[in-house]
Amino acid sequence: MVGSVSRSMARSVRRAGVLAVVVLLLAGSAAAQAPIEYRVSFPAPAHHWAQIEVSFSGLPNAPLHARMSRSSPGRYAVHEFAKNVYDVHAFDGAGRELVPSRPDPSAWDVEGHDGMVRITYKIYGNTVDGTYLAIDTTHAHVNMPATFMWARGLEDRAVRLQIVPPPALGWTPATQLFPTSDPWTFTAPNMQYLMDSPIELSAQAIRTFTVRNPDGRELAIRAAVHHDATNADVDAYAAAVEKIVREEGAIYGEFPDYETGRYTFLADYVPWGGGDGMEHRNSTVVSSATSLRAGPARVLSTVAHEFFHGWNVERIRPASLEPFDFTRANISGELWLAEGFTQYYGGLVMQRTGLAPLDATVRTIGSTVNAVLTDPGRLLNSAVDMSRLAPFSDAATSIDRTNLSNTFISYYTYGSAIALALDLSLRERSGGRISLDDYMRAMWRKHGKPGGPQPGLVANPYTLRDARATLAEVAGDRTFADGFFDMYIEGREVADYARLLQPAGIILRKRHPGAAWLGPVTLDPAGRVTSLVQPNTPAIEAGFDQDDVITSADGKRIGGGTTLESIVRAHKPGDRLTIAFTHPDGTQASGIVTLAEDPSVEAVTVESTGAAPTDAQKAFRTAWLGSKLP
Ligand SMILES: [Zn+2]
């Protein structure tokens, strides 16, 4: 139990709608409580550690429960961030050292203090992405839950954070934290906002442009880019970012009211970076080992995805993630919408801006639909179920082997396929009057735009039932909304994509019509099966599985140019063949399979088949894939 005041307050706002009262209460209590003071310095960046000091004052006469987070918003697996903490010391207000007890691996309980506790520790970090901490001689890339201790019961206190940069490296700070008159000191109104506010310290390039909302408020959009390219490369990147930002603004008709008046892309495009994107309220981390010297093309789809999250998930937020619990894995059945719809719009916006060619967009549509049609996970789990598996799949590591490849389809892929089906269905049934853009705007008006009692909190997060009800309103048809949710979101059926894509002049067809198929079985050069055998494929009939060695198929020995694939390819669907194999214990066995027709599909434009799109198809494409900017 977290017992956080912010959690109970967020709930009471939701229930009673007493927003004004809560704001007053919060303002009153925050003023009465001393802010939590952090200081972070980097005495030895080459050795990848930071020195942290955190001071809690005005404490009640009770033990202080300090802890490291075990999860980070937007990453759903448990990460034991405490593992990189060392050299921990605690002191009271008089400077007397206190010895913390350790009730669990992430916690330090400090008793016997005098109303103030100062904790100092070192923390190691050398992983550049959206989840961890990375310190080297070129930068400090700080994800907050991976770096800073916090204290139970003090989640609503304001925070002051002072950064001490290493001398002579030319670093500047970029973060969504609130600035102060001192360029190295920042504030956050509460712990949720602090933990959501990564910091990049480096000799980074800054590019800024402004957007204006219909209410006249100007917002700054800033790209803070740690890179190994030229100024011209960064200019080209920033120009593409601006295109994406404006196109996404056109979907909602306005930008979120970024609380600090600006939104920041914290970009790390350095060869030692990991490929990642991590959304936050007023910023995002986008990282890639791809240099901007090669042009921005390969990093932009992540930009398009993450910026869309500023609406969808940061503000249009599932109730299952609000407020985020830093002590455990957070489970959400709505990631097909939070991540999957964002994935769909990332690709759609790349197309609408002209930053992606039509053929690439259509290819992605084909592979997305193919995954949902053919991956075995759908036999067991709906898109809601898949979302709830995120803690086991999203950057989760385990030593034991799993069969997730047979039970799980990424909620990015699955949700993106659902978004495609819903967009095309709404357009089909309304003659083009209503689209998924209308649905996202409706979700924004109800759940995102109302804001929260404080920056970092969302007052009106949505449930699955809300998402369904909003579809009924937008479509003007409760039966359609219930059918769509029952079949494709909470059920395991697949929409008729071939019919839905036809008005856009896109053909969904068999990728290898007439080709014999055993299933996706991969072998290493010694014939050892490296993949799990899928339950919905002919291969399962033979009786072999991962780690068995296939010795022959159809009487032909595997090896020396004869592969399992080449043997299968020489057959027709319906043919039976015997496969012989050896189990890891040396036992030999064989089984007979009946080959099927390769079920995989692809999407292509009518143009690629030699036909021409009709005027109606051209008009459909313009409405769907064309820019929404005036
Ligand atoms: Zn995402």
Image (cartoon, rainbow, N blue to C red):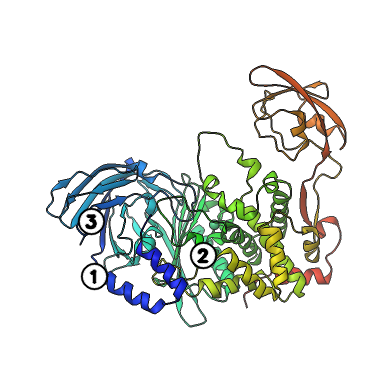
What percent of the width, then of the height, locates residue 3?
36, 59
Residue type at mark 3 is Ser
Residue type at mark 1 is Ala
Is 170 located above or below residue 24 in the figure?
above
Ligand 1 - quadrant of the structure image: bottom right
**Between 356 and 601, which is closer to the camera in this rendering?**
601
**Label 2 element class:** loop
Residue under pointer 1? 32
Crowding at dot 1, Cα within 10 Å, few <14 / some 14-19 / many 20+, comes out as few
- The answer to whether any part of residue 54 appears in the image is yes
Disc assigned to residue 317: 2
Pick whichever of labels 3 and 1 is earlier in the sequence.
Answer: 1
Residue under pointer 3? 55
Pick whichever of labels 1 and 2 is earlier in the sequence.
Answer: 1
Residue type at mark 2 is Arg
Q: Residue at x 46, y 72 (%)?
A: 15
**Label 3 element class:** strand
